[in-house]
Image (spheres, rainbow, N blue to C red):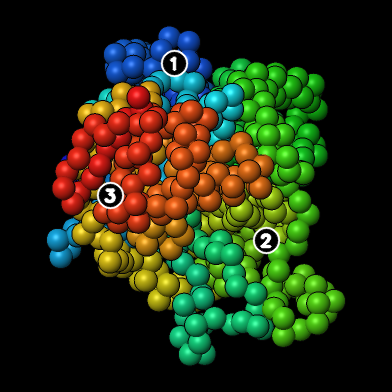
Amino acid sequence: MASPVNAVLCALIATAFWSLLGYAIARHLFPRALAVGTAAVVGWAVHSAIMLPVYVWIGFAPLAVAGSGALCILIAGFSLSLPAAAGNAEPDLTIPAWAFAAAAVVALVPAAAILPKFAGGGVQVAEPIFDHSKVAMIDTMARLGLPAVNPVFGEAGGIHRLVYYYLWHFSAAELASAASASGWEADIGLTWFTAFASLSLMMGLAVWLGKRSAAATWVVVLSTAASLWVTLYRLFRVDDFEPVLWPPIGMGGWLFQATWVPQHVMAASCVVVAMLLVARYALRPRLALTLALALVVVAAFESSTFVGGVTLAIAGVIAAPILVIAGLRTQRLRFVVGLAVAAILVACLVAPFVLDQLAMVRARGGGSPIALSPYTVFGEAFPLRLRRIMDIPGYWLLILPAELPAAYCAGIVALTIALRSAMRRPEKLVVAIFACLAAAGLVISWLLASTLGGNNDLGLRAIIPAEIVLIVIIAATVASMPGRGAVMAIALAGLALSLPDTASLIRDNVVGEPKPDAKIFAQAPELWAAVRRHAAPDIRVANNPLFLQDLTPWPTNLSWALLSDRSSCFAAHDLAVAYAALPEARREAINAQFVRVFAGEGTADDVHQMATQYDCAVAVLVPQDKAWDRDPFAASPDYRLAESRQGRWRIYVRR
């Protein structure tokens, strides 16, 4: 199981290394408060975007990680010895140390969700662990290097590379290598770092815009807000509002997103930094800003195609006229050329990811990965034609206030106040660009949907940059601007009403949920240690895709993902949906075949295909499999029994 000590070590390494590197860069780009606030995000983004292709070239190994880390520290030290850029000194603006301490405490909530919880002789997990089954990617990169191998599915003649925006998980593999930790432990540490870095960014922006250190306090407070749904359900004494309302897809607040999808939160933080860099570049074009912008955009895209690709692109199109008009007339050509250079650098660096994504779409045989699909608000209690009309105001007047009760309404008012205020030109331009980013995120979540993967990840994640912007603007407004009383009252009212959901989220993250399979899960590390004795690091393992499926709300092969440190020939249906280049009909057929074999209903041909077509070099049976009493591997000429432990496991290896 994951060790909290190793997870803390990963978090400390991440914070010290990327914050040092980031501040050494950011102090030449931003005023002091912004440099301190953006340091963690900038350091992570620049380092990760550069080192991923470098490791593909030189090899991804512990010695390479240590050597490159030492070199980066030397470069950071040299940068810190140089004077900061002229015009970046604002000595009176600081982020209080206690604000960072409070942010560190809030960041524990997302990290707690991924920790194993020991109770009653078993190990319980919280629901968000489902989305952290991507730990298998981290282990695979740490074990096999780069380019990343797909740990979920393998087939003769198929795509063996991992096709996913995996930069965040690559950086977790770096942590695992540096700290000699497991992928699960690195995931916990990086989740904490991501939440802390995002909060630091918001605090730096709020202090810089609001010109008050107290703005940092409001960022931490507002970040804890959840949704209104639990409050509304309790008020009306119902479990849901069907058929009046369609079940919400669960956008949630910043804390919810940081718990479930830290990679998208980091991408959103990079998007916010990218918009900040563009705004500063429009007023004062510099090569350093161009290079930093390109690398931050690359990091955003390679961590989340939906946030760092679609959302940032649309926001950029909306903001472009404002940026061109705001720039100095004599500098406009230089501004456009600089952005073109940044775009070329981005295109070159992200090309492998884009080509792989296109290959994945073709292999699946689907249509467009993004579709126009307005958010469905109202349910079948209303006629279809009527509810499609009602859905338009319903999204803006019902869904957004319910999902973002402390940020949406107060944020709209705060943006209006900030845009009308007597801010200096640089701050006013940043607010205007942030307004474009918030509008893009909210509109994308309203109108667009992703069609691949069985989940509308685009609609769920495009809203994260908007959440960050709204929290920042509220905090800055409440700290210093006229009309702050109204903004404060609206924000605090939403925060108070969301407390039941916040309390529920924290409780579930910390305690987990008791499950009948918790005791079996507690014994799984011993099982997978035995498997690794017979499975070389580069081979694929077959086990029941439904093993311990009750641990999470959606069935997935959690023990394999978190504990095996080996690739699978077919891990689970829900994982194959997202990461396997298979048409739907074929994916369903393969899933049925694997389930059939481990249910004891497979044929000799099914087992033969596992050994040959799907490259299952090792097969694992446990008493929970129905095939335990109807063992299809024992009679197969393709496998031999390598190890058997009475009542615990049988491990077969391919002949």
Q: Which residue is mark 1?
A: 55
Q: Is residue 102 visible?
A: no
Instruction: Measure the alpha-carbon separation of dots 3 and 2.
Output: 61 Å
Image coordinates of residue 121 in percent, x first then y, are: 14, 61
Q: Is residue 637 visible?
A: yes
Image-based side of 606 in relation to 541, left or right: right
Q: Which residue is mark 3?
A: 622
Q: For the point 38% across and 36% down, which residue is it? A: 636
Callout 1 secondary element: helix
Image-based side of 289 in relation to 388, left or right: left
Rendered-image quadrant of the N terminus: top left
Label 2 vs label 1, nearer the camera: 1
Mark 1 or mark 3, earlier in chain: 1
Q: As shown in the figure, which amino acid type bears the numbered disc 1?
A: Tyr
Q: As shown in the figure, which amino acid type bears the numbered disc 3?
A: Val
CA neighbours of label 2 inside 10 A, class few (<14), some (14 to 19), many (20+): some
Q: As shown in the figure, which amino acid type bears the numbered disc 2?
A: Thr
In the depicted structure, whether residue 334 falls above or below residue 649: above
Callout 3 secondary element: loop
Q: Which residue is mark 2?
A: 416
Rendered image: mark on residue 285:
none
Instruction: Measure the alpha-carbon separation of dots 2 and 1.
Output: 46 Å
CA neighbours of label 3 inside 10 A, class few (<14), some (14 to 19), many (20+): many
CA neighbours of label 1 inside 10 A, class few (<14), some (14 to 19), many (20+): some
Q: Residue furthest right?
A: 385
Quadrant of the rendered image containing residue 401: bottom right
